[in-house]
Image (cartoon, helix red, strand yellow):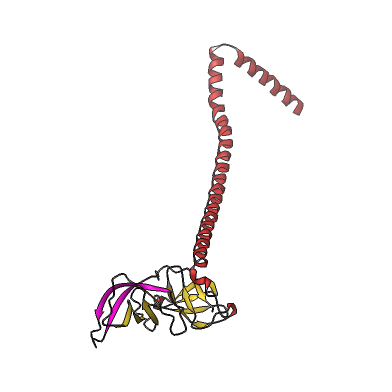
């Protein structure tokens, strides 16, 4: 039975081919009908590789974007490391290093409630730090250490109201005391002294905490003390930008 079925199917197929091959109106119409029936399946067959290709391209595009993001992050990390190394080289080339033993430290924290008064360093007594060590950078004096643990230290900034530094006017050599607050103020200067706007104010070296010659700031305005009238006071523009502290040096001895 199966053999007869195949024989009949073969005969019909042969006849079909012969009919389609004849240049008759019927055969042309038949070919047209067959073409319309077959075309959707042919188009579907062409579409499947196209869909697969689009999926592959989308996946490749996602992988390329991810790789691009990784490369951008690596470039950013390298750029930041290069900038940090440059800042550290500037610190290590300071003249103060010729006279004192110092150690570089990174700023790792600031108190949100006392942003202008203190900061935290990644060095502690394990690195040789103790309390009352001067902290500075390439611009000038920053403050002193006030609390030291094994691996960290807290620094009291010059702007803290409790900060007091023995100082000198660099040109006139007149002594005074720089106190912190909303502004740095040079106090107890001889009322007969001549203080020039823009004159540098440096550490005097007295008191045993800050070595002599570290830049504190520059004179902005000068007034006679309103309470006693016995001495001059000068507001100072800090040498250091306290908003942008990242690496510092601590004088060990």
Identify whether 194 is placed above or below 246: below
On the image, the x and y values in percent for residue 6 come to 73, 25
On the image, the x and y values in percent for residue 123 come to 55, 76
Determine the residue positioned at 29% across, 75% down.
195
Place residue 103 in its image quadrant.
Answer: bottom right
Determine the residue positioned at 74% across, 24% down.
4
- Asked whether residue 208 appears in the rendered view, the answer is yes
Q: Residue furthest bottom?
A: 228
Instruction: Please name the predominant secondary structure of the magenta segment in the image.
Output: strand
Determine the residue positioned at 58% across, 33% down.
45
- Label count reads 0
Identify whether 113 is placed above or below 62: below
Determine the residue positioned at 32% across, 74% down.
236
Asked whether 237 falls inside the magenta stretch, the response is yes
Asked whether 163 falls inside the magenta stretch, the response is no
- Quadrant where the image shows the N terminus: top right
Point out the stretch of residues depicted in magenta.
212-239
On the image, the x and y values in percent for residue 231 come to 27, 84
| Closest to the observer, 169 or 93 | 169
């Amino acid at each position: 039975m199966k053999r007869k079925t195949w024989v009949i199917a073969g005969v019909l197929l042969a006849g079909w081919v012969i009919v389609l091959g004849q240049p008759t109106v019927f055969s042309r119409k038949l070919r047209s009908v067959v073409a319309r029936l077959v075309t959707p399946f042919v188009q579907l067959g062409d579409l499947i590789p196209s869909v697969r290709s689009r999926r592959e391209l989308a996946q490749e595009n996602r992988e390329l974007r991810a790789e691009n993001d990784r490369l951008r992050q690596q470039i950013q990390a390298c750029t930041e490391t290069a900038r940090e190394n440059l800042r550290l080289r500037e610190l290590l080339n300071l003249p103060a290093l010729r006279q004192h033993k110092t150690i570089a430290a990174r700023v790792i924290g600031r108190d949100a409630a006392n942003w202008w008064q203190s900061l935290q360093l990644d060095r502690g007594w394990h690195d040789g730090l103790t309390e009352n060590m001067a902290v500075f950078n390439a611009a000038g004096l920053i403050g002193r250490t006030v609390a030291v643990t094994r691996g960290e230290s807290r620094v009291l900034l010059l702007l803290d109201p409790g900060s007091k530094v023995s100082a000198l006017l660099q040109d006139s050599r007149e002594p005074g005391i720089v106190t912190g607050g909303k502004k740095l103020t040079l106090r107890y200067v001889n009322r007969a002294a001549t203080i020039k706007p823009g004159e540098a104010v440096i550490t005097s070296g007295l008191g045993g905490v800050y070595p002599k010659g570290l830049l504190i700031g520059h004179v902005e305005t000068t007034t006679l003390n309103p309470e006693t009238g016995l001495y001059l006071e000068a507001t100072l523009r800090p040498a250091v930008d306290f908003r942008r502290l990242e690496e510092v040096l601590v004088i060990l001895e």
